């Protein structure tokens, strides 16, 4: 470089001495700049949260079960998730007391369900034949498939009937309770729900 | 330039070159990285895969740009837009198959490139940073593959993303909120597809290109390793001032790599034209069905390049936790008995106690996620795990050779099992393979230190 102005550039007073007031200004600028960068990151990160529309779609949905016979299941979509409504037959209900020793959490201590479903039916006591459950495996989010027939050849002779997760083989009974020693840690989630009439359900809300 | 005065009589192209060179370090870059970059003269077959990976990167960027011209990142349109590209866009099928086959080719090249480093100790001092940049390239590539796989919005796209995002849900306390934040919704949805598109086409590729530049700059700073694992810079030819065992990258290795490129493109074209799905390995059968959020396909598995780690995840059951527990206890006994300062001993014992506590507190699902992450991240530590006095496998003893052989077998077995429907026997095999996989790394400081090595030669062979 042969910049003619080089020789006349203003240097720090007396060579090596630090100009304290400028150093402080530099430090303050760095701190302010850092804080501003951090603050500006927030809107960007927060924009990744579910949008107002996605949250609105989490609103309760109605389901009509008048056509669902005993032993049949209806799947409805709520918050984009499959929600099962299973009208259990007497035989299905009878299995729920027999399988307790095979389950990881028969009393639903760990799992998520509203207080009124914390029983072996995992349903409202007055309509205990109707199981409402979020059909998403607590392992890694696959949707389990029905294996309702007792002794289903693919499930083994002692199988009482219930659900199988196709991804990693977790098994659930007719109350969506998980069998012990399978990858899923918890029973399936029971959403809040209430009956609007004998055959109409509101899923996602339980307040009248 | 010194000869600037004579420019009037020179050819216009030369004058243009000199005009540029006075304003941009064109000839300097050319010399430093090509014509005067001295690489060891003994590069063999394994040294093709770095340049091939670079070729595939370019291929992916070019085909990717053209795909975005017709693809629609919208949950209601995405699947149909891919079919539109396949059936109605002129040559769209070719561009799409080049891109989907390119993804697998990228991982094949990168895995073989990494294997070369394991053979010849290319990650060792002074090339640790080259290795680390490479590791982050590998991570970015996995992110790129994962984000890209959602875009066709097929059944496997959807449920694969659902499973992987839910892995984050396993993190205690914050996991569930984190998973919602990543998806932008309560399940994988249009919001997820849209952001994965943004990450796949711009965010990750930018990072990837930057890391590739850093990887090559770091490599050219230290100079390339070679199959003998010796430093060619230690022997400078006094006449030329260049490494005696080095040859200029250009023309010697550009020509060699050109040959490799031809062979690669030959094989690549055969796959693109005759077996683009590669029997369901490169493009999975279930992905030819549109995504259905209410119905999981009967068997889901990630694409082949993720299956080794996915197998580790599935192999982590309550029984495997016992094995981890025993390993931690052995580690703590060793920590107690080893020589060294008391502080180090306390830190090691403390780590052991935390791990044991973790075994009681966290369930197998969380451990599965930790081990799966660990099986990828552990590659980053290789430069500090290898204590052998020599770099190359040619001069290492039987212990490293056996360990590397077992590791490769475990890796392939895990990869295969990750594609299969698990049963009791296969899970058991995956557990053994998982233990071998981790043992290769965790025992490395021990077996490389006691292994009998041979004296490497002074000059490359």
Image (tube, rainbow, N blue to C red):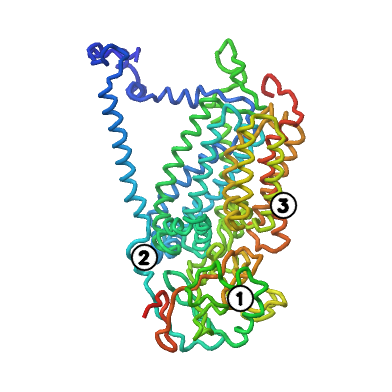
Quadrant of the image for the N terminus of chain B? Answer: top left
Label 1 to label 2: alpha-carbon separation: 32 Å
Chain letter, disc 3 residue:
B
Residue B274 visible, this angle: no
Residue B100 visible, this angle: yes
Nearest to viewer (mark 1 / mark 2): 1
Q: Nearer the viewer, residue B450 or A117?
A: A117
User: Dot 1 corresponds to which residue?
Assistant: A173
User: Residue A97 location, x and y as percent?
Assistant: 64, 80
Q: Give yes or no for contact between labels 1 and 2 (Cβ–Cβ under 8 Å).
A: no
- Residue B196 falls left or right of residue A103: left
- Residue B329 falls left or right of residue B202: right
Have a look at marks 1 and 3 and say if they share a chain.
no
User: Dot 3 corresponds to which residue?
Assistant: B432
The numbered dot on residue B365 is none
Q: Secondary structure at mark 2?
A: helix
Label 2 to label 3: alpha-carbon separation: 44 Å
User: Dot 2 corresponds to which residue?
Assistant: A54
Q: Give yes or no for contact between labels 1 and 3 (Cβ–Cβ under 8 Å).
A: no
User: Residue B213 location, x and y as percent?
Assistant: 46, 34
Nearest to viewer (mark 1 / mark 3): 1
N-terminal of the pair, mark 1 or mark 2, is 2
User: Residue A77 location, x and y as percent?
Assistant: 44, 74
Q: Give yes or no for contact between labels 2 and 3 (Cβ–Cβ under 8 Å).
A: no
Chain letter, disc 2 residue:
A
Label 1 to label 3: alpha-carbon separation: 31 Å
């Amino acid at each position: 470089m042969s910049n003619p102005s080089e020789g006349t550039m203003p240097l720090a007073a007396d060579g090596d001495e630090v100009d304290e007031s400028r150093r402080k200004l530099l430090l303050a600028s760095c701190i302010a700049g850092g804080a501003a960068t951090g603050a500006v990151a927030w809107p960007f990160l927060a924009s990744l949260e579910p949008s107002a529309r996605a949250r609105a779609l989490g609103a309760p949905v109605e389901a009509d079960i008048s056509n669902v016979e005993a032993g049949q299941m209806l799947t409805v979509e709520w918050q984009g998730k499959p929600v099962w409504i299973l009208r259990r037959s007497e035989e299905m209900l009878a299995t729920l007391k027999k399988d307790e020793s095979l389950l990881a959490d028969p009393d639903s201590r760990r799992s998520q369900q509203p207080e009124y479903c914390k029983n072996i039916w995992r349903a409202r006591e007055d309509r205990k034949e109707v199981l409402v459950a979020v059909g998403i495996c607590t392992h890694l989010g696959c949707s389990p498939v029905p294996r309702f027939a007792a002794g289903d050849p693919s499930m083994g002779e002692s199988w009482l009937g219930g659900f199988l997760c196709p991804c990693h083989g977790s098994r659930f009974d007719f109350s969506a309770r998980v069998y012990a020693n399978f990858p899923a840690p918890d029973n399936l989630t029971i959403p809040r729900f209430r009956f609007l009439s004998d055959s109409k359900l509101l899923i996602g809300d339980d307040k009248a | 330039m010194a000869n600037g005065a004579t420019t009037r009589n020179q050819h216009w192209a030369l004058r243009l070159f000199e005009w540029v060179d006075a304003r941009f370090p064109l000839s300097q870059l050319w010399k430093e990285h090509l014509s005067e970059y001295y690489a060891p003269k003994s590069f063999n077959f394994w040294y093709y895969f770095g340049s091939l990976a670079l070729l595939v990167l370019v291929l992916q960027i070019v085909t990717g740009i053209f795909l975005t011209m017709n693809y629609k990142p919208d949950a209601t349109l995405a699947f149909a837009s891919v079919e539109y590209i396949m059936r109605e866009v002129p040559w769209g099928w070719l561009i799409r198959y080049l891109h989907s086959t390119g993804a697998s080719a990228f991982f094949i090249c990168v895995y073989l490139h990494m294997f070369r480093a394991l053979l010849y100790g290319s990650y060792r001092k002074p090339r640790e940073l080259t290795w680390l940049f490479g590791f982050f390239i590998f991570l970015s590539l996995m992110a790129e593959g994962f984000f890209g796989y959602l875009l066709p919005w097929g059944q496997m796209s959807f449920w694969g993303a659902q499973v992987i995002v839910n892995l984050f849900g396993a993190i205690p306390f914050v996991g569930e909120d984190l998973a919602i934040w990543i998806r932008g919704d309560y399940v994988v949805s249009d919001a997820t597809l849209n952001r994965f598109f943004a990450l796949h086409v711009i965010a990750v590729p930018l990072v990837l290109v930057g890391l590739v530049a850093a990887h090559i700059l770091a490599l050219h700073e230290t100079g390339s390793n070679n199959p003998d694992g010796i430093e060619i810079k230690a022997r400078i030819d006094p006449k030329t001032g260049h490494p005696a065992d080095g040859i200029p990258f250009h023309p010697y290795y550009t020509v060699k790599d050109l040959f490799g490129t031809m062979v690669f493109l030959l094989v690549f074209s055969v796959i693109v034209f005759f077996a683009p799905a590669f029997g369901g390995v490169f493009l999975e059968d279930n992905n030819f069905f549109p995504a259905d959020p209410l119905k999981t396909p009967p068997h889901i598995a990630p694409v082949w390049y993720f299956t080794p780690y996915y197998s580790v995840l599935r192999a982590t059951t309550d029984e495997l936790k016992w094995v981890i527990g025993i390993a931690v206890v052995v580690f703590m006994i060793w920590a107690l008995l080893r020589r060294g300062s008391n502080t180090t001993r306390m830190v090691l014992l403390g780590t052991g106690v935390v791990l044991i506590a973790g075994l009681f507190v966290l369930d197998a699902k969380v451990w599965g996620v930790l081990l799966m992450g660990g099986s990828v991240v552990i590659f980053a530590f290789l430069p500090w795990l290898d204590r052998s006095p020599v770099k190359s496998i040619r001069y290492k003893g039987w212990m490293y050779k056996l360990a590397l052989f077992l590791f490769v077998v475990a890796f392939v077995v895990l990869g295969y099992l990750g594609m299969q429907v698990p049963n009791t026997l296969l899970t058991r095999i995956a557990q053994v393979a998982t233990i071998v996989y981790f043992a290769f790394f965790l025992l490395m400081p021990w077996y490389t230190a006691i292994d009998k090595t041979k004296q490497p030669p002074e000059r490359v062979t």
